[in-house]
Amino acid sequence: MADATRKIAPAVVEDEEPVARPAPVRKKRARSRRWWLILPVLIAAAGAGWYGWSTYGKQSATDTIVTETPLRGDIENSVTATGLLSPIKDVDVGAQVSGQLKSLKVEIGDRVSQGQLIAEIDSASIETQIEIAEAELANLQAQMIDKQAQVVLSAANLKRQRALVAGNSAAQSALDEAIAALATAEANVDALKAQIRKQQATLKDARISLGYTKIYAPMSGTVVNTSATEGQTLNANQTAPTIVTVGDLSTMTVEAEVSEADVGKLKTGMDAYFTLLGQPGKRYPGKLRQIKPTPSTENNVVLYYALFDVPNPEGALMMNMTAQVFFVQSSASNVLTVPAAAVRSDADGKSGEVTVVTASGTRETRKVETGIRNRVRVEIKQGLSENDAVVVGTGSADKPAASSRSSSRRGMGGMPPMF
């Protein structure tokens, strides 16, 4: 046993050196440390990949084509503008004589008839002028009697002197003096007649001025403004002061501001209409009456004024209302239309292409014949039916375009989305 032990012992001793190998243990630990260093990088890369897929991959997966079925209805192409409402006719009623405004018999909003008394100016001063003019005229007329008597006397003296000269009872010089005296008397009568005519004109003017102290409505209409008050002194020597403004509101005029880029599209007599801010669904139609040749410039923008009239029997339209105006170039009723974004027009402007989603879910390009076009929709004359699903754009399920997608599915007969 002892020998055996001795024989084995050296073997064990010989094996101890190879068994106690520290190097392999260090390699395993180094590899473990490298894996712990690489693992966070791999985790970060995986997280980034997952985030990118969840964000962009999901978004691309949910992107969809937005379609819309053609709609049948009305379409028009028009020039739009803004304008203001004003009476078709208005008159500033002023004072033609100076004086104190004694009474104002109307207020804003009152309806007046032509010839109705609306104001009165104090007439005391003008009545005094009339009295003076009448007295002066009476004085001149009295003088006229005296001058005419002088003519009669001079004519009689001339007749007598002629008889005396014919009988050689008077000198020729006496006859000459009689002729001169008659001529002077007649000239005095003529001069006095001129003074009387002048005084008569002065009296007539004073009486006319007296009539101007009562102010009457020049036309039937509505009082839209008052510029003077009772007791105010009016001075008409330089300009006629305005007392009231009377307007005919039974018909209103729309004065629209049209840019120089659009004014060439307008033609006198073309259909037009406007809407009001408070009544967006109601149209007031008319026809273009006039384009004023003189423009106005605002902020370097040249604007021309286009006018058309509309009846106002109920008085619903008021002055200075803001109107959204439409001048109709072309229009059609009960036609098939699609959004303008869905049509790729050809150079001729009368045809184009649209993309349609078929019942199988594939896309198909179709040639169409187009008609009236505006900024929103295009008339389709040929090439589409009301059941076609026309591609108008793309959208996402997380955005409002989803509602358009659902409507397009209804247009495709309730088919599930293909994209």
Image (tube, rainbow, N blue to C red):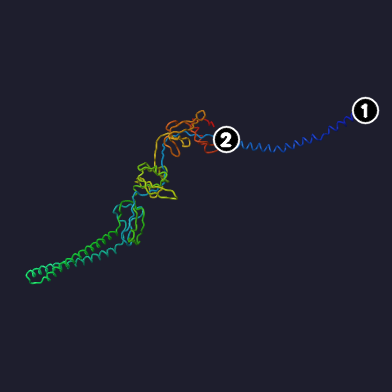
> Can you tell which of label 2 and label 1 is closer to the viewer?
2
Q: Which mark is residue 88?
A: none
Residue 348 image offset from top left, x and y in percent: 43, 35
Residue plotted at (66% across, 37% down):
45
* 215 or 95: nearer the viewer: 95
- Mark 1 = which residue? 3
On the image, the x and y values in percent for residue 54 come to 61, 36
Report how far apart the C-alphas of labels 2 and 1 lie in the structure: 84 Å
Residue on which disc 2 sits: 60
Mark 1, secondary structure of its residue: helix
Quarter the C terminus occupies: top right
Residue type at mark 1: give it: Asp
Quarter location, residue 335: top left
Front residue of 213/344: it is 344
Residue 37's place in the image compared with 146, above or below, is above
Indicate whether 15 appears above or below 251.
above
